[in-house]
Image (cartoon, rainbow, N blue to C red):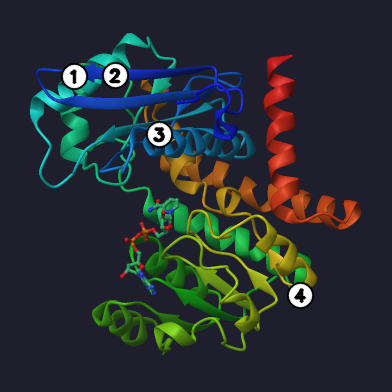
């Protein structure tokens, strides 16, 4: 299996393959960059089809964290880890303790946290073996409200740039996914007078937003074709694709979901259609910003975290303006800016 030649390897500083026979742990820890500070990124537990698939996923996610942390203006690099296995049937205390020991052996080069397939209880076990864990219970808490606040601020930046409006009053927003982030986002939007068109696969989630916030419910397949100002993807990734793009009627895409563009070329198509794309890892950085305020034993202060999240607005305006000036897509400009910040820190 190729490693250094993999496209996803992309100048990773360190990749650690972790094996503990007794507990059955097979894990990969990727440290993409520590130029801006210790690498920070969650741990995912997933039953991958192959070791190569696990490695590529970890490498891509790890680089993504470098870019996200750099553009959030954090003194943190990027990393990520994956535990290979079924999160429903293969968890044990010994497995998470073994993982914690591997994280600890990196001496603070990498901080781990929760991600897909991992619960706060799992991370508490990892913490028995290492202090290099962020987002533990009783510290900065649920990141979702802070992520939602950042998405709200980022949406305001996009609406300002694309529609020239300072307020979301009367702005029509189609929100897809009314889970942890989506619901809080709707609260912010409603409080500023936005008109909400919402969908979810869970009827109870829709009913809650309709009755509490006066939103209009929309069928899940019709969310893309709503005649709205903003489409806010807050459910799954890859919802901007060849099937949905022809349906979009909005001027702005701004939402919480990770990896919204199925492929980079879909950013080009959005641009051709005159739709402003708000790069996902910039607008959804509120959660990682929140958690960063408990690093190095700092006493967590929510207001300080929210003040930092406010910076998402200015970062996005900078990206939108550069994209316009250089005739590039916003996703390309964001990647370039992130690489520049990391390179500057290195030099
Ligand atoms: P969540 O699981 O709480 O909510 C997702 C919601 O989307 C659920 O209510 C689910 O029923 C709904 N959904 C799933 N498939 C759907 C579909 N096809 N159509 C409509 N609705 C659908 O997750 P969350 O924590 O709110 O996160 C939302 C997105 O934001 C995810 O992509 C996540 O990766 C990303 N994100 C979250 C955070 C955070 O702090 N929670 C931070 C950064 C990025």
Marks 4 and 3: CB-CB under 8 Å?
Answer: no
**Is the residue 280 above or below the residue 131 in the image?**
below
Contact flag, marks 4 and 2 (Cβ < 8 Å):
no
Residue 146 numbered tag: none
| Sequence order check, earlier mark of 4 and 1 | 1
> Marks 4 and 2: which is nearer the front?
2
Whether label 3 lies within 8 Å of ligand 1 gets the answer no
User: For the residues marked 4 and 1, what is the alpha-carbon distance in whole angstroms?
Assistant: 50 Å
| Label 1 CB sits under 8 Å from any ligand 1 atom | no
Quarter of the rendering occupied by the N terminus: top left
- Name the residue beneath numbered marker 1: 98
Which of pointers 1 and 2 indicates the residue nearer the eye?
2
Give percent across and percent down for residue 58. 43, 34
State which mark lies toward you, 3 or 1. Answer: 3
Residue located 51% across and 38% down the image: 60
Residue at the spot x=58%, y=68% of the render? 241
The reply to whether callout 1 and callout 2 are in contact (CB within 8 Å) is yes
Mark 1 closeness class: few <14, some 14–19, many ≥20 residues within 10 Å: many
Residue, disc 4 = 273
- Ligand 1, by image quadrant, is bottom left
């Amino acid at each position: 299996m190729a490693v250094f030649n993999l496209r996803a390897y992309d100048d990773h500083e360190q990749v650690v393959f972790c094996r503990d026979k007794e507990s059955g742990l097979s894990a990969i820890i990727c440290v993409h960059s520590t130029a801006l500070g210790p690498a920070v990124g969650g741990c995912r537990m997933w039953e991958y089809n192959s070791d190569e698939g696990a490695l590529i996923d970890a490498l891509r996610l790890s680089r993504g964290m470098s870019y996200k942390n750099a553009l959030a203006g954090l003194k943190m690099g990027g990393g990520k880890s994956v535990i290979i296995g079924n999160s429903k049937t293969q968890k044990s205390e010994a497995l998470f303790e073994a993982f914690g020991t591997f994280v600890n052996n990196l001496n603070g080069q990498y901080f781990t946290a929760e991600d897909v397939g991992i619960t706060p209880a799992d991370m508490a076990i990892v913490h028995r073996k290492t202090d290099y864990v962020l987002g533990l219970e009783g510290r900065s808490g649920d990141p979702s409200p802070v992520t939602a606040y950042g998405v709200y601020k980022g949406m305001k930046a996009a609406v300002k740039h694309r529609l020239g409006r300072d307020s979301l009053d009367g702005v029509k927003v189609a929100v897809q996914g009314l889970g942890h982030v989506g619901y809080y986002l709707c609260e912010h939007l409603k409080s500023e007078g936005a008109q909400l068109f919402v969908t979810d696969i869970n009827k109870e989630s829709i009913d809650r937003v309709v009755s509490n916030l006066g939103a209009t419910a929309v069928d899940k397949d019709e969310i893309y074709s709503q005649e709205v100002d903003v489409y806010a993807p807050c459910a799954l990734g890859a919802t901007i694709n060849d099937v949905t793009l022809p349906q979009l009627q909005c001027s702005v895409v701004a939402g919480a979901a990770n990896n919204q563009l199925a492929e980079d070329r879909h950013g080009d198509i959005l641009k051709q259609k005159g739709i402003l794309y708000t790069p996902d890892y910039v607008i959804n950085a509120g959660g990682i910003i929140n958690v960063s305020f408990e690093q190095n034993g700092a006493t967590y202060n929510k207001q300080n975290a929210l003040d930092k999240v406010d910076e998402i607005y200015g970062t996005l305006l900078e990206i939108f303006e550069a994209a316009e000036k250089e005739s590039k897509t916003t996703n390309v400009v964001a990647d370039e800016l992130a690489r520049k910040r990391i390179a500057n820190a290195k030099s």
